[in-house]
Image (tube, coloured by chain):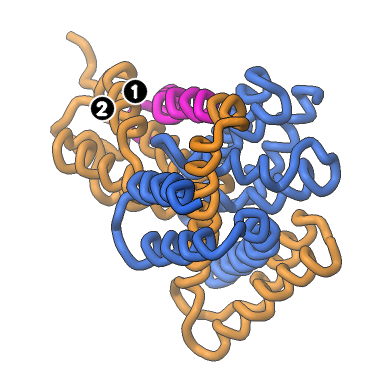
């Protein structure tokens, strides 16, 4: 008689872990058909993996979401790696990240090639000019999205002004490279704790 | 450009950021300011190309890799994009137990704030490059407002901005 197979720790106990192929299929389908950035994709994955297929518990899903936010790089990819690792181990992490990213990366290169070959086309350049302006607005929205949770209360606001403003001046006016600025911001945060939960 | 160097530069940018576009200051510093591999305008185009299709915001790194080294460069960009994601696996074991320590939380907060300041610093020249007149300013403001205050999909925003750009030809 075969020994009982125990599920990975994040899986609901009554459910069998899926095959690597099945896991990759889900990430491929959702990651390459969802527009609107990381949060939209994470929401779709939660609906599919937690609510519909029950491959992972909501507690583990939340943990993956929280840790992805403090992992360097693109949050969405770290989130996928965490979910893949919880469900199918390290191979699951690799499968999830590659399935989600490789097709859309190839598409981005095709779009980039198209942009380059359209340089002389005034219709294409007018359309691209419009989207470049929209992306500039998008960058400022990203900045606000990052800053918003840190604003509130005199001490916290002072930290925002000093660390964020200091980093801006150090880079923009004194041309200090980003690495020491990031290290400095982390050190200031470490030494000057605000004592409040985010 | 040497592919290993390209990978390492993009990996450095990816490793020192905590959001898709957070790597922009490092990329601009290394490729536009220091090495003159491409211009602010080309960097803007790479960001647009990365945002036009589905997938995470950080996909622009693949386009940056393509600009610097063609298709092999794009592969380096892809690898640099996905490599840091796997750090979450040891992090799940280590930080999962320490994430509530106030000093760890404050250090992460300091890091996020410094990253934001850098993002502001690199967004200013890119915004100046994207400014071509009243319409571009209106599009920037509208894009900011739509993404910040509504749940409208960014794909619709990009389509609308492209249509507005085309409409300007009508009035010339």
Disc 2: CA contacts within 10 A as few (<14), some (14-19) or many (>=20) = few
Tag 1, which secondary structure?
helix
Q: Earlier in the sequence, mark 1 or mark 2?
A: 2
Report the chain holding disc 2: A
- The spot of residue B91 in percent (x, y) is 52, 46
Q: Which chain is orange?
A: A
- The spot of residue B34 in percent (x, y) is 85, 45
Q: In the figure, is residue B42 to the left or right of A64? A: right
Tag 2, which secondary structure?
loop
Give the residue displayed 45% in from the left and 63% down from the top.
B144
Write down the residue under mark 2.
A6
Badges 1 and 2, same chain: yes
Give the residue displayed 60% in from the left and 37% down from the top.
B61
Q: Is residue A130 magenta?
A: no
- The spot of residue A67 in percent (x, y) is 46, 51
Write down the residue under mark 1.
A24
Give the residue displayed 49% in from the left and 79% down from the top.
A151
Identity of the residue furthest to the bottom in this view: A154
Q: Colour of chain B?
A: blue
- The spot of residue B46 in percent (x, y) is 59, 38
Residue A146 visible within the image: no
Q: Is residue A105 magenta?
A: yes
Q: Which residues are magenta?
A: A86-112
Q: Which secondary structure class fits the magenta region best? A: helix
């Amino acid at each position: 008689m075969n020994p009982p197979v125990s599920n990975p720790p994040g899986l609901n106990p009554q459910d069998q872990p899926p095959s690597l192929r099945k896991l990759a299929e889900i990430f491929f389908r959702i990651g390459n058909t969802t527009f609107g950035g990381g949060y939209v994709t994470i929401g779709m994955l939660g609906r599919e993996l937690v609510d519909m297929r029950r491959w992972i518990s909501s507690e583990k899903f939340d943990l993956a979401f929280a840790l992805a936010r403090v992992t360097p790089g693109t949050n969405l990819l770290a989130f996928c790696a965490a979910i893949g690792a919880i469900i199918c181990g390290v191979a699951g992490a690799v499968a999830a990240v590659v399935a989600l990213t490789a097709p859309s990366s190839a598409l981005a290169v095709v779009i980039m090639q198209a942009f380059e070959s359209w340089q002389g086309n005034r219709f294409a350049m007018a359309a691209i000019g419009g989207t470049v302006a929209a992306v500039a607005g998008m960058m400022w929205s990203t900045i606000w999205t990052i800053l918003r949770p840190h604003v509130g209360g005199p001490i916290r606001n002072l930290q925002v002004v000093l660390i964020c403003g200091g980093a801006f001046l150090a880079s923009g006016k004194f041309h200090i490279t980003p690495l020491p600025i990031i290290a400095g911001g982390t050190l200031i945060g470490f030494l000057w704790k605000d004592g409040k939960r985010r | 450009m040497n592919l290993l160097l390209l990978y390492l530069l993009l990996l450095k940018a990816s490793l020192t950021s905590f959001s898709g576009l957070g790597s922009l200051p490092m990329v601009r510093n290394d490729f536009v300011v220091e090495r003159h591999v491409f211009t602010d305008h080309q960097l803007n185009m790479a960001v647009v190309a990365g945002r036009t299709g589905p997938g995470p915001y950080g996909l622009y790194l693949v386009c940056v890799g393509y600009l610097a080294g063609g298709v092999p460069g794009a592969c380096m960009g892809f690898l640099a994009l996905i490599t840091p994601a796997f750090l979450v696996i040891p992090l799940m074991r280590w930080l999962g137990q320490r994430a509530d320590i106030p000093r760890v939380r404050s250090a992460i907060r300091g890091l996020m704030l410094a990253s934001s300041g850098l993002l502001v610093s690199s967004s200013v020249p890119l915004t100046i490059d994207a400014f071509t007149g009243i319409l571009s300013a209106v599009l920037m403001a509208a894009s900011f407002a739509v993404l910040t205050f509504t749940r409208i999909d960014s794909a619709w925003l990009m389509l609308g901005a492209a249509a507005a750009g085309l409409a300007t030809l009508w009035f010339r």
